[in-house]
Image (cartoon, rainbow, N blue to C red):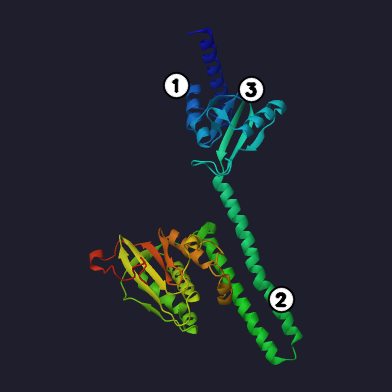
Amino acid sequence: MTTTGYLAVSIGLALIGVIAAFFVGRFTAPRRPKAPEGLTVADLMQRIVQDSHDGIVVLNHFGDVVLHNPRAEELGVVRNNRVDDRARKAAEAVRNSNEVVYVDVSPPEGTKGRQPAAVHAEVRLLTEGFTVVDASDESEAVRLEKTRRDFVANVSHELKTPVGALALLAEAVLDASDDQDEVRRFSAKIMQEATRLGVLVTELIALSRLQGAEKLPELSDTEIDVVINEALSRSKLAAESVNISITTDEPSGFVVPGDRSLLVTALTNLLDNAVAYSPPGSPVSVSRRLVDGHVEIAVTDRGIGIAEDQQGRVFERFYRVDKARSRATGGTGLGLAIVKHVAANHGGEVKLWSLPGTGSTFTLRLPAAATEPNPTLVPTGAGDSGGEL
């Protein structure tokens, strides 16, 4: 081996020792177990670095990559053995100030390949002339923070409308205190807005609960026929007010592990949605069947339908296909989001088939209980959500 080769090996071993000391310092414990026979502490630390969930990069005083683990390439911090320019500049600042620098090294928009949306790195001095970049994938945290901000903004907007209306109506009642007819008219509107506000708050609480704000109840065997009957009872008044009849297939005896109250809420939301987006006098149907160990409850309407480019968004909070119709019916934009989370919390899903001008079928698909009857004895034609409206 040449003198240059010996020098390179020596530098490499020295850096491994320095990295080992760096990470041992970060994870120091009162008592350290001995390394397995045949492995040194440097070997163990090298394995930790190589297998780390974070991207680790060591740079020399020129900003060149001396060592890096595979995760650094996965996060895009190192490409073609060159470190991201933002990390290199941060490393230069660290060498000048000897202070830790935090830098955003997220991939630029439009980057090809599967890359995380947000990567943040901590750059610190490793030893004289050398710096270490410790990068982590913060995509989920950034997504959740954006979701939280959007949620707060949407809630604020949605609450402002009925609250503002209540204030104006109360003022109108005071001004018309001598006119009993006007007082009754404004009072009815106050009741309407108060009801809308109550529904919104109730659905916000339900959605918060479903998203983990509190522990969900234990799932128990729940009869789907009972769930359907109770949901029909809740939606009956709204359907009758617009001359819509809701028909169902025969009772099935299907059972699922679930929370009855949540399942009734989800199915009621699907029925209310079908009624709200259907023309007066049109039919709505509910059917159930057993497919591949799952109970499917399909709600079909002959309403306005949903365009293909909007079908992926209808389960988002506060998203409305027809905002004017939603305002007229008092919709909150949370109903389908609640359905999606109820299904997910039961190990199931909700599927959608829709065609503008023809109608829609929402199918709540839930794992069946082990006590279900033999599927070969159950007709599979009823409630097919494949587009037969």
Q: Which label belongs to residue 189? A: none
The image position of residue 249, as x and y in percent, is: 33, 76
Return the residue found at the far front: 357
User: The disc labelled 1 sits on which kind of residue?
Assistant: Leu
User: The disc labelled 3 sits on which kind of residue?
Assistant: Phe
Q: Residues within 10 Å of mark 2 (few under 14, many from 20)?
A: few
The Cα atoms of the two marked residues, 1 and 3, are separated by 32 Å
According to the image, label 3 marks what residue? 62
The mark that comes first in sequence, 1 or 3, is 1
The image position of residue 181, as x and y in percent, is: 68, 91
Give the residue displayed 47% in from the left and 21% down from the top. 40
According to the image, label 2 marks what residue? 167
Q: Is residue 349 visible?
A: yes
Secondary structure beneath disc 3?
loop
Q: Residues within 10 Å of mark 1 (few under 14, many from 20)?
A: few
Foreground of the two, 153 or 278: 278
Quadrant containing the C terminus in the rendered view: bottom left
The mark that comes first in sequence, 2 or 3, is 3
Q: Is residue 374 visible?
A: no
Give the residue displayed 57% in from the left and 22% down from the top. 18
Above or below 134: residue 297 = below
Secondary structure beneath disc 2?
helix
Q: Which label belongs to residue 39? A: 1
The image position of residue 301, as x and y in percent, is: 42, 74
* 2 vs 3, front mark: 3
Residue 133 left/right relative to 339: right
Location of residue 97 by image quarter? top right
User: The disc labelled 2 sits on which kind of residue?
Assistant: Ala
